[in-house]
Image: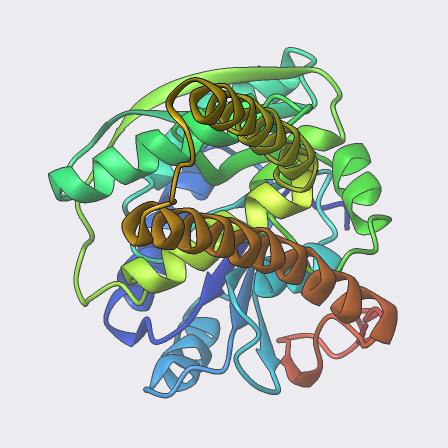
C-alpha cells in the first residue's frame, strides 16, 4: 500500500504528552482522507515513554516505534525517523504539542500545489520567556548573516518535506546534523505557512540554556566558516594598531625625551592579546572537534528494536 504522509516524532521523556499527541495526529489525518504512518523515535527515554508508545501502537496500527540504543540527541533521532519513513511526504513534529497537528492540512494543501518543502513559521512563541525569545531572535539574526544558505527565521523542524527532499537529505553524511540548516541547504521549491506557537502541553523541556548554546554553536559551525576567517582580520587590525602606537611612542620620545612604559598599560596589552589568542584557539577547537567526529565515521545511531504491527515491512540498515 502506498503511504501518502509519514509523521516523524522524536521523543525523549514524553510519556505525559505522547498519548494526547497520537490522538490528535490520528484525528487530524483521518479527516484528511490520506494514508499515513506515525514514526515515533524513542531517543533513549528514561521514563515510561516506550511503554506509552507501545500502548498507543495497540490503538493505532499506523504507528511504528523505533527504539534507539541510547540517547543520541534530537537531530540524530529525527534523522533516524526520516530513514524509516515510506510516505510520499514527510512531516517532522515535536512531541510537546507546541506545533499544532491541525496545521498539517494546510501543509498538505501547499504540497499538492507543487511545493517540495512547506515550512511552518511561528508568528508568536506563546509560553516562552522573554529571555528565550530574545536569544532565539538573536540566534536567527546571527546565523542568517554568517551562513551562505538562507535559513528561515522562527522556523523549527515542523514542516512538510516531499519524498525527493527526504531522499536528498539522507545522502548528506555529516555527523553534526543541524537539521534546520540541512532542510534549507537542499533547496527545492519552498513556501511558508504561519501559525501561533502554543505553550508546552505538559512536562518540562529538556532544552536548558547550555544545550541551546551548544545547539547554536553546532548550527553556526556547520553552515559558516566565517568564525575561522575573522581572526585573520582581527590579527591584521591589531597589528596595524600596534604599529600606529609604536610610531606614536617613537615620535613622542623624540620630542619629549625617554619614555618609560607604565606597568598598567603593559599588563592591559598582554592580557588583551592573550585573551584574543585564547578565543581564536577556542574557535579552532570547535571546528577541529567536529572534524574529529566526522573522520571517525561512526554510524549516526544504533537501533535496539523496531516495533511494528506488521512484521512484513522492509527495514533499512541501522546506520
Foreground residue, 296 or 234? Answer: 234
Whether residue 297 is visible to the viewer of this picture, yes or no, is no
| Residue 285, percent from left and from top | 65, 62
* Residue 69 position by quadrant: bottom right
Residues 112 and 176: in front is 176
Is residue 56 left or right of 187 when viewed as pictured? Answer: left
- Give the residue at the far front of this rendering: 257
Q: Could you say where residue 237 lies in the image, as x and y percent from the top left?
A: 58, 26
Rendered residue at 60%/27% (across/down): 243
Question: Is residue 217 found left or right of 309 in the rendered image?
Answer: left
Side (left or right) of 227 relative to 263 = right
**Residue under the point 60% across and 48% down:** 178
The picture places residue 184, in percent across and down from the top left corner, at: 65, 29
Taking 276 as reference, is 187 left or right?
right
Is 98 above or below relative to 32?
below
As rendered, which of 42 and 295 lies closer to the eye? Answer: 295
Check the image and tell me how it is coloured: rainbow
Q: Position of residue 70 (x, y in %)?
A: 56, 85
The number of callouts visible is 0
Measured along the vertical axis of the image, is residue 121 above or below residue 277?
above
Q: Is residue 209 visible?
A: yes
Q: Quadrant of residue 137?
A: top left
**Quadrant holding the C terminus:** bottom right
Tell me what residue is drawn at x 61 percent, y 39 percent: 227
Amino acid at each position: 500500500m502506498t503511504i501518502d504522509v509519514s509523521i516523524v516524532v522524536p521523543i525523549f521523556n514524553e510519556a505525559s504528552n505522547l498519548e494526547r499527541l497520537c490522538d490528535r495526529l490520528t484525528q487530524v489525518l483521518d479527516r484528511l482522507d490520506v494514508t499515513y504512518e506515525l514514526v515515533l523515535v524513542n531517543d533513549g527515554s528514561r521514563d515510561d515513554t516506550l511503554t506509552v508508545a507501545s500502548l498507543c501502537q495497540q490503538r493505532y496500527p499506523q504507528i511504528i516505534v523505533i527504539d534507539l540504543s541510547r540517547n543520541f540527541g534530537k537531530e540524530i533521532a529525527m534523522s533516524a525517523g526520516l530513514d524509516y519513513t515510506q510516505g510520499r511526504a514527510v512531516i517532522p513534529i515535536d512531541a510537546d504539542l507546541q506545533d499544532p497537528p491541525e496545521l498539517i492540512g494546510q501543509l498538505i494543501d501547499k504540497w499538492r500545489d507543487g511545493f517540495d518543502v512547506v515550512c511552518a513559521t511561528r508568528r508568536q512563541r506563546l509560553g516562552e520567556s522573554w529571555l528565550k525569545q530574545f536569544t532565539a531572535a538573536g540566534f536567527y539574526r546571527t546565523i542568517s548573516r554568517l551562513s551562505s544558505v538562507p535559513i528561515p527565521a522562527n522556523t523549527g523542524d515542523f514542516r512538510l518535506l516531499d519524498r525527493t527532499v527526504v531522499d536528498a537529505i539522507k545522502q548528506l553524511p555529516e555527523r553534526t546534523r543541524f537539521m534546520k540548516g540541512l532542510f534549507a541547504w537542499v533547496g527545492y521549491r519552498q513556501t511558508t505557512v504561519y501559525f501561533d506557537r502554543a505553550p508546552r502541553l505538559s512536562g518540562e523541556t529538556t532544552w536548558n540554556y547550555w544545550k541551546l548554546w551548544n545547539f547554536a554553536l553546532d548550527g553556526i559551525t556547520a553552515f559558516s566558516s566565517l568564525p575561522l576567517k575573522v581572526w585573520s582580520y582581527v590579527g591584521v587590525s591589531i597589528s596595524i594598531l600596534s604599529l600606529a602606537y609604536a610610531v606614536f611612542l617613537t615620535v613622542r620620545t623624540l620630542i619629549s625625551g625617554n619614555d618609560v612604559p607604565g606597568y598598567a598599560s603593559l599588563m592591559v596589552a598582554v592580557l588583551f592579546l592573550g585573551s584574543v589568542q585564547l578565543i581564536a584557539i577556542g574557535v579552532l577547537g570547535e571546528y577541529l572537534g567536529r572534524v574529529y567526529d566526522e573522520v571517525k565515521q561512526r554510524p549516526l545511531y544504533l537501533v535496539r528494536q523496531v516495533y511494528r504491527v506488521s512484521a512484513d515491512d522492509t527495514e533499512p540498515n541501522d546506520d
